[in-house]
Image (tube, grey):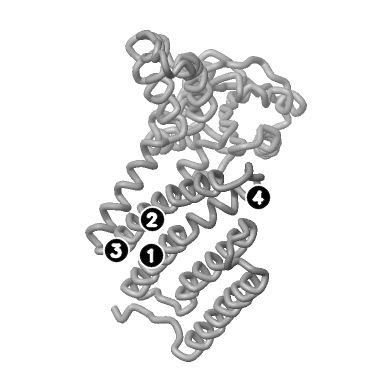
Amino acid sequence: MLLVLCIDLDDDVGRKTGIETPVVGRDAVEDAAVEFATADPEDSDLNVLFEGLHIYDDLSAEEDESIEIAAVTGLEGSDVAANRAVGEELDEVLARLSTGEDVRVLLVTDGAQDESVVPVIRSRVEIDGVRRVVVRQAQDLESMYYTIKQVLDDPETRGTILVPLGIVLLIYPLAVLADLLGMQGDVFGLVSGLLGLYLLSRGFGLGERLDGVVDRLLSGLYAGRVTLVTYLVAGVLLLIGSASGYQTLQTVQADGDPLGVIEVVAAVIAGAIQWFAAAGVTSSLGRVTDEYLSGTFEWRYLNAPFYIVSIAAILHAVSVYFLEYDYATLSYLALILTGGTLLGLTSTLAFAVAESRFGKRTDPT
């Protein structure tokens, strides 16, 4: 008996149609192929099934021996697990074909990856040959645009091909930008830089992420979310805090000896922490307001502003202590540390009691 065996190593047939494999018999394979074509007409494994049916019909008309056709699948992901799954399904097919005849196999695949399962099949049955299906249109120039488009849209190829290619194309413009004063460069550097940025954006899927961010912003705007305003204000406060921290560092450096790493960090924190704390409180209050309006408010959410104030006070006290400000004595540091700790503990306990007594607010609708 000759068995025409169609291989689908990554189980596209099962995943996209829900058909149980293995599929044995011409009618069953034809039904699976039609259903697979309806689910995904662009999948290359579809050609394997129809090529197997074509081979089966030709051999049935020419050969005197009995012919059978079957389709077996592996698993998506690990090649080892996929090969093992194909072997198990082949064992099931051979058990169904237990006619007493010696079974030989003609494999039908769509590429070298599926042919990696050949040793597994050869360990179970004799292989007469391997037929690799090549789609004829894929060799024509007219399909080049479609092929490139498919590569750009495939998330698996984007990370493995486009990202390294984009980095390579960015090497030259980055070298040109090293000489910022001269601003020297040519058309090749500009074009390769633009191509590199484009390929990187496609490779990392930045377009889809940007679309998602815009959709969330628009939905929040029309839904009246307070966080849109508070996040914007918080961003401005963070910028102001960064500038304030830099100014404080410049002032401290101008007043004394060169600073060490600890003093530099302390100076930046001392100048920026109050602005950062204001940004954190603003954004957290906006989030709490939105949670209340949406009916998912919980009392423990109110801990965030108090925690932010506590952490900011502690960081400010520690930083000015290292900078040896006049008021930053050891007693002052101990007072702020104790007060910040008590503020956090008190808020946690108070809102825990409030939540246990009043419970979570639910949306009346």
Q: Which residue is mark 1?
A: 282
Among numbered discs 4 and 2, the one appearing first in the sequence: 2
Q: Looking at the image, which residue is at 77% across and 26% down?
A: 123
Q: Quadrant of residue 222?
A: bottom left
Amino acid type shown at disc 3 = Arg
Which residue is label 2 attached to? 237
| Residue pictured at 60% horizontal, 25% vertical | 114
The furthest residue to the bottom: 357
Res. 53 in view: no
Q: Earlier in the sequence, mark 2 or mark 3?
A: 3
Q: Which mark is residue 262?
A: 4
Residue 298 is at least partly visible in this image: yes
Determine whether label 3 and label 4 are within 8 Å by CB. no
Query: Between marks 3 and 4, how big is the CA–CA gap?
Result: 40 Å
Residue type, numbered disc 1: Thr
Q: Nearer the viewer, mark 1 or mark 4?
A: 4
| Precedes in sequence: disc 1 or disc 4 | 4
- Dot in front, 1 or 2: 2
Quadrant for the C terminus in the image: bottom left
Which mark is nearer the camera, 3 or 4? 4
Q: On screen, 248 above or below 292? A: above
Question: Tag 1, which secondary structure?
Answer: helix
The image shows residue 50, relative to residue 15, as above or below, that is: above
| Mark 4 touches mark 2? (CB < 8 Å) | no
